[in-house]
Image (cartoon, grey):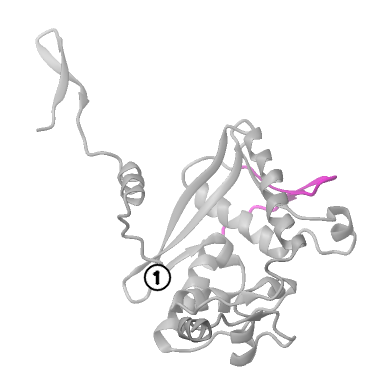
Amino acid sequence: MKQTVSNQMGSGQIALAEEIDTPLGIVNFLEKRNGISNYNPKSRYSVTELVGCQRKSLYKQLGVSQEELLGDTTLESMWATVRGDFLHQMTYAYKWREMDIEHYVPLKNGKVATVAGRLDMYDWKTKTIIDLKTTKFVRWQIKQGFLPKLEHILQLQCYNTMFSQYMPVENLNIVYADMTDIVTYKVQKRDLNDWINTRIQEIEDAKENNVMLCGETSALCKYCKYQTKCSEDGEGLTDKPLSTPKPKEHAIRGKQN
């Protein structure tokens, strides 16, 4: 039985506190720690996926198995992962960091899709959203025109669209960092609500109508784990795939026997 704590004031009582349900976030955390999860990946997107290749998002929604990158276990690739973890410690520069959010998109079929995001840093004093991107050869990439990347700009503008509903946002900054340099760009604020809705609806329509979206090819394709699939589907990757389908479980067992 839930309780109410009250205080006698004059001729009546004033409620000071009332017992309510445990916050959903805590319940979800405890369920996950105990192996209980109602997570449904369908119609759920991350901001990173949304600003990336639409076909890649569609593959994920369809449950297409990821392939193995041919250079997955090179020393360079393993160091790149660890290097990113080291540099990401910079997010501790702000108290408001690693902030999660969910944005809901109504679909034509009456259902709702979810866009999940995680903001690296927020400076409450200047009302600035800050996103950290770790890479290598920052100055060289800038000189070559590779930075800032369009998908990084769109990602920040998505965060602005999502977070500005709950807290003031006046500035959007991308911070590029490698082991020797840190370079910051200020991004123009834009409301991408319509863009988000349209992009997700296109993926949902493709799922429902069994239609394959065109691949949005870029330099990031070489890191994609759907390269062979994308190449075979056409209107996507045209270079030699740098990932290969994983051996089927029964084939592996056959070799072992």
Residue 6 x, y percent position in the rendering: 16, 18
| Residue occupied by mark 1 | 42
Asked if residue 21 can be seen in this view, the reply is yes
At horizontal 85% and vertical 64% (from top left) the residue drawn is 145
Viewer-proximal residue among 55 and 89: 89
At horizontal 55% and vertical 75% (from top left) the residue drawn is 66
Going by the numbered disc 1, the residue's amino acid type is: Lys
Residue 77 x, y percent position in the rendering: 73, 62
- Give the vertical position of 15 relative to 171 (above or below): above
Left or right: 88, with 164 as reference point? right
Disc 1 secondary structure class: loop
At horizontal 51% and vertical 48% (from top left) the residue drawn is 163
- Give the vertical position of 209 relative to 15 (above or below): below
Quarter placement of the N terminus: top left
**Location of residue 209 (image quadrant):** bottom left
Viewer-proximal residue among 5 and 234: 234
Left or right: 110, with 148 as reference point? left
Viewer-proximal residue among 11 and 154: 154
Q: Tell me the magenta residue range.
A: 170-191
Residue 106 x, y percent position in the rendering: 38, 67
Q: Residues within 10 Å of mark 1 (few under 14, many from 20)?
A: few
Task: Say if the magenta span includes residue 106.
Answer: no
Left or right: 11, with 179 as reference point? left
**Location of residue 153 (image quadrant):** bottom right
Residue that extends furthest to the top in the rendered view of this protein: 10
- Give the vertical position of 44 relative to 181 (above or below): below
Residue that extends furthest to the front in the rendered view of this protein: 257
- Give the vertical position of 77 relative to 110 (above or below): above
